[in-house]
Image (cartoon, helix red, strand yellow):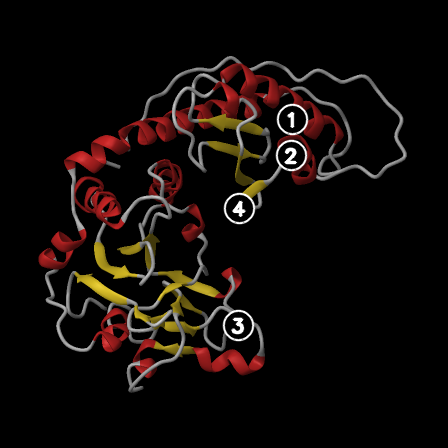
């Protein structure tokens, strides 16, 4: 991956063996790894079963401004906490020591036998350290991305290859034309999922386009399996788009991230949606390679973008729909029809 935040910096981190804690007698049932983590770290914003963001245990030592996604927890194999701030390193090291001792030696998620870190565990930690360096580099590059790739709201509109004139209420039609005609698309409101009567919200793009209008504020940027009735990850057939948004960057700022992703990283920007709220949604063709997705999962949150949009079935705002009496709309469209 190209760009300021996409380079790799490899380094070796010393890894201590996990010693067996003193045995103790308890009458309570063992906790799961996630329960132990929440017990030790407080509230965790889980973005996957094994990854989540939490408040840094050394937050009081931070010398720079705090962000909501500074501290990232991994629970797979070797529990590891990382923070973007260097000043809290001793607190992070101590938190990792306690977390690993509690989970590796006392969680109901393992066989209950104390163990030392294996060679595989250490290799995983080394790779995780590399990924953390990438995340830190991305966070530090944000001011440079905002300064060097400025793309304001008005500039985005002016630069749209397709001039978006006409009825904004019909912008949903333009977006659906970026899918394949046979793709099964979900359109609806948040709770239009999970029951037999919700089958009507799952139609092919071609069938949706036969309608004069659609109801619902949301769409999913994926194609679902035929005969789906639930908007779930298990029912996703193929991921067509990755939608990028930020709940902290202003509209004039997040455009810089979109432009950087398009021009420097080389991602295919298809559309930008004004959500009729505080944010913009950038629709990018979904990367073809897993390693690109893995790096984007590290880089984009460090650039203050929402990691929850990596969830395949996560609904996003549908252009053309009303939100609090304001129109959600397209402000950028790369091509008139790009389905193939």
Per the model, the C-alpha gap separating discs 1 and 4 is 19 Å
Q: Is residue 146 above or below residue 92?
A: below
Q: Are marks 2 and 1 in contact (CB under 8 Å)?
A: yes
> Where residue 210 appears, x then y in whole percent?
29, 86
Name the side, left or right, on which 58 lies relative to 294.
Answer: right
Q: At which x and y percent is residue 283? A: 28, 57
Q: CA separation, marks 4 and 2?
A: 14 Å
Report whether residue 4 is seen.
no
Residue plotted at (54% across, 34% down):
74
The residue beneath circle 1 is: 99
- Decide which of 51, 70 is in the foreground and name it: 70
- In the picture of the structure, the residue carrying the numbered disc 3 is 193
The secondary element bearing badge 2 is classed as helix
Residue labelled with disc 4: 48
CA separation, marks 3 and 4? 21 Å
User: Can the viewer see residue 38 in this picture?
Assistant: yes
Sequence-earlier tag: 2 or 3: 2
Residue under numbered circle 2 = 37
């Amino acid at each position: 991956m190209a760009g300021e935040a996409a380079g790799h910096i490899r380094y070796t981190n010393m890894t201590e063996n996990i010693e067996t804690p003193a045995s103790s007698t308890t009458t309570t049932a063992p906790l799961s790894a996630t329960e132990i983590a929440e017990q030790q770290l407080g509230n965790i914003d889980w973005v996957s079963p094994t990854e989540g963001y939490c408040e840094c245990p050394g937050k009081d030592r931070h010398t720079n401004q705090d962000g909501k996604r500074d501290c990232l927890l991994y629970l797979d194999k070797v529990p590891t906490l990382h923070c973007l701030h260097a000043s809290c390193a001793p607190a992070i090291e101590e938190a990792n020591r306690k977390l690993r001792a509690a989970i590796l030696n006392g969680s109901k998620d393992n066989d209950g036998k104390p163990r030392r870190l294996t060679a595989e565990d250490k290799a995983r930690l080394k790779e995780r350290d590399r990924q953390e360096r990438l995340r830190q580099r991305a966070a530090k590059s944000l001011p440079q991305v905002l300064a060097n790739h400025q793309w304001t709201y008005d500039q985005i509109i002016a630069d749209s290859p397709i001039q978006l004139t006409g009825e904004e209420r019909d912008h949903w039609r333009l977006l659906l034309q970026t899918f394949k005609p046979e793709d099964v698309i979900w359109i609806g409101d948040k709770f239009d999922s999970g029951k037999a009567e919700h089958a009507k919200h799952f139609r092919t793009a071609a069938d949706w386009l036969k309608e004069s209008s659609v109801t619902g504020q949301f769409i999913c940027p994926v194609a679902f399996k035929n005969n789906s009735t639930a908007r779930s990850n298990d029912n996703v057939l193929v991921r067509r788009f990755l939608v990028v948004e930020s709940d902290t960057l202003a509209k004039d700022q997040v455009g810089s991230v979109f432009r950087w992703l398009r021009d420097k990283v080389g991602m295919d920007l298809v559309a930008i949606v004004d959500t009729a709220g505080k944010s913009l949604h950038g629709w990018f063709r979904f990367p073809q390679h897993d390693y690109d997705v893995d790096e984007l999962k590290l880089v984009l949150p460090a650039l203050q973008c929402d990691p929850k949009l990596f969830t395949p079935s996560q609904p996003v705002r549908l252009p053309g729909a009303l939100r609090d009496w304001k129109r959600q709309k397209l402000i950028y469209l790369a091509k008139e029809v790009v389905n193939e």
